[in-house]
């Protein structure tokens, strides 16, 4: 009976991913020292917890199901536990710890059904602060595809999960923000946030190899190749002076789990679907009077996905072909001609619920 569907694109502040992966001991830089808790402005509650595998899974699960205000309303414990691949008891234990740390607030309505609020959602979990009427991010956030979230839940070893979270942040920074062809983590960087007992080169390489379904990882050990990569990567140039050995991992995220690529492709397809509908409908009605901003169509695409949007848009297009201008006189389509965005959202919501039940 959950009131929250799983988000298709899960937006997580980089500082949260860094905190869950573990802070680095590799702090020395050319100009001094860099401490991640200060650099990323990580709130104290995230540092107070030891981030075990189940806690990482549970927080990612909450972020996967919350709305844009950080709320999960009338959600079943079993649903959240199943998503995180843990027991309900483990979920309840971690929810209690999260609340004690100040990360969430929650209340049980009745047995097995609760509502959860992520405390200071925009600031803590999205790294968004309001400045002069607009929102800005200091250290950024990463968009994670729901399919990637499912793969993360399948990782059995906490240290491999921690490496995956770091890799996601680095892909976001190097590829999506700085437009580099590949993201780069040096051996020193990976060794710095992992426990000392698993920081050996072969152990680190083995962990990254196990992420091959999610990332295309290439090991660079040759000094010339290492220096060549440094020349092409702006952020790496600032980090290189304290590297102890010329060893790095070059990464690209798999296209099937790349949230940004998927989102842009689906947005484009949804816009094309709307334009196709317009070309058919304008033969029967003054379609240009229906105000539908592209931003609204993109938002619907992000929320429900292209397949759902395409099904609804094709259904409307077929109804125009069948009924023509008489469609304006039907009760079923009255909301469409009054507020097409609300109509589309309602149709998509019902379709999404129907598919979830099926």
Image: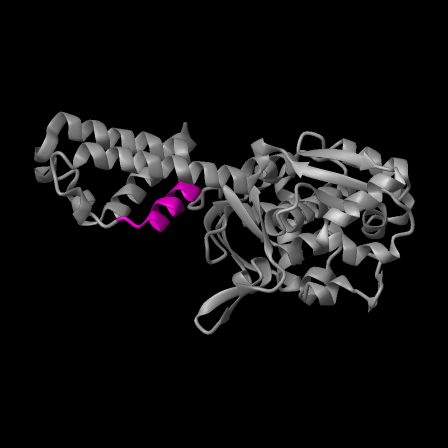
Quadrant in which the C terminus is drawn = top left
Q: Tell me residue 83's x, y (percent).
A: 58, 38
On the rendered image, what quadrant is the N terminus found in?
Answer: top left
Tell me where the magenta segment starts and ends, as one range.
292-304
Indicate the position of residue 260 as horizontal and vertical percent values.
53, 43
Instruction: Name which residue lies at 91% across and 51% down.
Output: 244
Which SS does the magenta portion mostly show? helix
Q: Quadrant of residue 128?
A: bottom right
| Residue 64 visible in the displayed image | yes
Q: Specify whether 285 is left or right of 200.
A: left
- Name the residue at 76% across, 52% down: 236
Verify whether residue 5 appears in magenta.
no
Residue 23 appears in view: no
Q: Which of 256 and 73 lies nearest the eye of the viewer?
A: 256
Q: Please determine whether, in this image, residue 203 is positioned above or below residue 288.
A: above
Is residue 109 left or right of 247 when viewed as pictured?
left
Nearer the observer, 244 or 203: 244
Residue placed most toward the observer, 70 or 16: 16
| Residue 114 x/y as whole percent | 50, 51
Q: State the colouring used for the structure image.
A: one colour
94 vs 294, left or right, is right
- For residue 34, which quarter of the picture? bottom right
Queried whether the magenta region covers residue 296, the answer comes back as: yes
Query: Where's residue 168, x and y in %?
Result: 66, 45
The residue lying at 83 percent from left, 33 percent from top is 206
């Amino acid at each position: 009976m959950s009131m929250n569907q799983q988000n298709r694109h899960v937006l997580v502040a980089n500082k949260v991913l860094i905190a869950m992966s573990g802070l680095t001991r590799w702090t020395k830089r050319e100009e001094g020292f860099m401490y991640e808790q200060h650099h990323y402005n990580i709130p104290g509650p995230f540092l107070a917890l030891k981030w075990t595998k189940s806690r990482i899974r549970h927080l990612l699960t909450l972020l996967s199901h919350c709305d844009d205000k950080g709320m999960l309303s009338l959600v079943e414990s079993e649903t959240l536990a199943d998503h995180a691949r843990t027991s309900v008891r483990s979920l309840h234990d971690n929810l209690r710890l999260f609340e004690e740390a100040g990360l969430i607030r929650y209340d049980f309505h009745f047995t097995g059904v609760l509502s959860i609020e992520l405390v200071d959602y925009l600031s803590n979990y999205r790294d968004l602060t309001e400045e002069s009427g607009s929102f800005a991010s200091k250290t950024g956030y990463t968009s994670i595809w729901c399919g990637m979230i499912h793969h993360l839940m399948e990782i059995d070893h906490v240290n491999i999960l921690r490496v995956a979270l770091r890799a996601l942040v680095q892909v976001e920074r190097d590829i999506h923000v700085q437009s580099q062809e590949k993201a780069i983590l040096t051996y020193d960087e990976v060794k710095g946030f992992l426990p000392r007992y698993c920081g050996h080169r072969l152990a680190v390489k083995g962990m990254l190899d196990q992420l091959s379904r999610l990332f295309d990882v290439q090991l660079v050990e040759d000094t010339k190749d290492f220096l060549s990569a440094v020349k092409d990567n702006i952020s790496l140039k600032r980090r290189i002076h304290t590297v102890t050995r010329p060893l790095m991992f070059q990464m690209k995220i798999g296209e099937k789990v790349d949230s940004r690529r998927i989102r842009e492709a689906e947005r484009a397809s949804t816009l094309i679907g709307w334009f196709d509908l317009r070309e058919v409908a304008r033969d029967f009605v003054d379609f240009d009077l229906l105000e539908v901003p592209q931003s609204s169509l993109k938002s619907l695409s992000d929320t429900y996905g292209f397949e759902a949007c395409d099904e609804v848009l094709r259904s409307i297009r077929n109804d125009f072909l069948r009924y023509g201008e008489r469609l304006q006189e039907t009760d079923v389509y009255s909301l469409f001609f009054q507020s097409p965005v609300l109509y589309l959202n309602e149709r998509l919501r019902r379709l999404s619920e129907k598919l979830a039940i099926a």
